[in-house]
Image: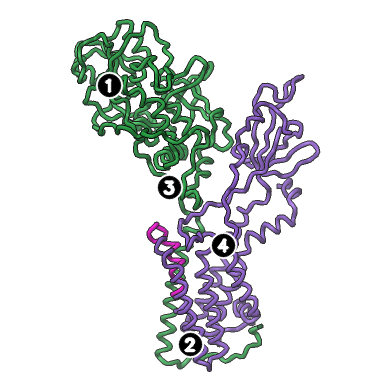
Chain colours: A purple, B green
Amino acid sequence: MLLLVQYVSPLGLLSALLIALVWAFPLVVLTFGVLGRLLRLSAPERFDPERSLLASWTARTPGWVATGAVALGALTWQLRFLPTLLMLGLCLLALRARYLYPDQPTRILLVSVAAPVAAAVLAYALLAPAAWTALRSGEPATAALLAVPPVATVLLTGPIPAGSARAVTHGLAYAVAAVLPLVTGAVFLAAPVLPSAAVVVAPPAPDGATPGGGVEPEVVLGALITVTDTSTVLLDRTASVRFLPNGRVRSQVLCPQPRPVPYSVVAVHGWPVEETVLDWMMLRRPVAAPDVRCAGRLRIEDRSGRSPG
Amino acid sequence: MNEAGEPRTPEPAAGAPPRTDRARRLRLVSLAAVLAVLAAAMVPIVLRLGPPTRDDLMDRAGLKGKPELLIGAKDDQPGVSQRLPNDVWRGFDVDIAYMIAGYLGFDRSQVRFLPMESEDRARRQARDRDGFVTVDLVIASYSITKRREEEEGAVFSAPYLQTEQSVVTLSSDTRPVSSLEDLADRTVCTLTTSTAIPRLRQAGARPIGRNRISDCFQEMFDGKVEAVTSDAAILAGFVTGDRPSDDGRRFPVTLHDVKPLQHWDIGESAAERWGVNTGPNEALRDLVDLALYASARDPENSAWEQAYATNFRWQQRYNFPQPVAVGEQPDPRKVEVRQWPWERIALPAPAYPGSPAAPAGTRGPAGRPRRGRRSSGC
């Protein structure tokens, strides 16, 4: 562990953290924003920024933060979560309009009924075939994520009973606050920090013989920690750190990080539901065959004992 | 806009008309329902429930980082699996082994065949220099039977060949054989592990068992036994002998006093379906099944057809009236794996070179319908 701390740059660690968890920011802002505004609209007498963290958050968060969160979510959330993002965004807008303009029924009707209905119609026009495919392919979770939020938006753009508003909103806020660190922690711990590499190492030389004479070299797979003057330091697949003498290293190659293969087979007009907008724009397939050393096998030139050119 | 400075003009909560109350209650119920549905939908996503990827299977099967694949095969069966004097292996089982190894990411130079006796196939023990080693896969004309799975501990993949039991006698022996009963009072040689032995006894024959089918043939050439029974695909290579294939290739004959043979269709035996014994590792079995599935379902993958044409099809003319083996790959088992969209469209072809397009007509005469009775267990 100390070795890792010594060699992994703090900037790299921070970057990995930000890249891995950038999706969590919109989730936090929008969820707490909706819950806070729901409380303010449903039970204004219990909306006390001095005593409630949720109320304080809602009162102090500027509108542009929510707008930015929606934009960031649109870029970094997977397609299957975009209907939920749409639901959160429209709910936020409607709850805000009801609070700010209670005496403008046309405006309220427009924002809390017409806009969600229009959005739902548009969403179903786009998502209905994919939701149907998901149902037929045995993916009810994907179908629910695509089909439920648009219609839910129409139902959820107003206040709830005042008596239960505080319990409901605070209970949900606590639940999100409790679960989110677990999920983000799991995602962050799985995020790669070190590059994967395969190093071909000649076996130790017997006295007076040339290194590796007669015995096949070994391919060591793992995460490359660093290369010093004397050794190549590698965290191997059994999670032990190996110091490979540079004199015995025949060749090495960086291996591509395996991207997670999608669980869902559903796509919306060619856009797989597990891809974000950014992924989709950069969706790429491997163009070259992976290096055999990354599968732990020797190349013919490594086997024949030639040094890399 | 900072909403702290927004005007506070809340809707009156108390004294709201009953219609508003109903709407609020409806919203609360809707909120609960929507949250319940979304939370339930998130569970499989957060827990990452779903089938494994091919890479996961490779990891679980212990193939990541494995320098070579050890395959146990018979070394004395021309056409099926034969080790030539120059240590080159040739035959249908060998080609299937290369096809599976290619799918697992091993090229031909990373596959090592080890000779194996019939009785060692369940335990996957093969001779290697001075001792025995456990091989990764057994591809040794190994028929799938319940007894082998349940009592001997073999774990079979989906079948890769379907054949049936048959009988071979010397051509000079003019007595026709159309059933096992015709072998009454004759000495018949078969493999020790064959379940045909009790049936031969039942038919009034005198069965003897040998570890290697080539020993049976040698004893027949030496006049010690009068017939040999086993799977047709195994016997066919001996009947074909050193007669030439379409491209002039011949099986090297290592037996002595070789005589012409006659292949007999005994017409009552069960379908023999050969499978790969993958051992207890389920991930490895799934990978082998994936390889067989790719070979059966991918129209661009003609490795199986090529193996059949190279090893069996041309032998048919020397083995009438007995069909050598069914000329189509048996139905594979579908294994669910997670794949990239582009992989779902086209199954990956074997990695090793040598799966050219099937020549015209390789799917020639379909085999006889499966009769599904007892098994000779070869």
Image: magenta residue range: A134-152
**Which residue is painted at 55% across and 29% down in the image?**
B110
For residue B336, the mark is: 3
Q: Can you give x and y, in whole percent of width and height, for residue B8 in the image?
A: 60, 90
Residue sticking out furthest to the right:
A229
User: In this rendering, would B159 be left or right of A282?
Assistant: left
Name the chain letter of the residue that bears numbered label 1: B
Q: Amino acid at mark 4?
A: Thr
Q: Is residue A262 visible?
A: yes
- Discs 3/1, front: 1
Q: Mark 1 and mark 2: span between their CA atoms?
A: 86 Å
Q: Can you give x and y, in whole percent of width and height, for residue A199 in the image?
A: 68, 37
* Magenta-span inclusion, residue A140: yes
- Discs 1/2, front: 1
User: In this rendering, would B178 be left or right of B24?
Assistant: left
Q: Amino acid at mark 3?
A: Glu
Query: Mark 4 = which residue?
Result: A276
- Discs 4/3, front: 4
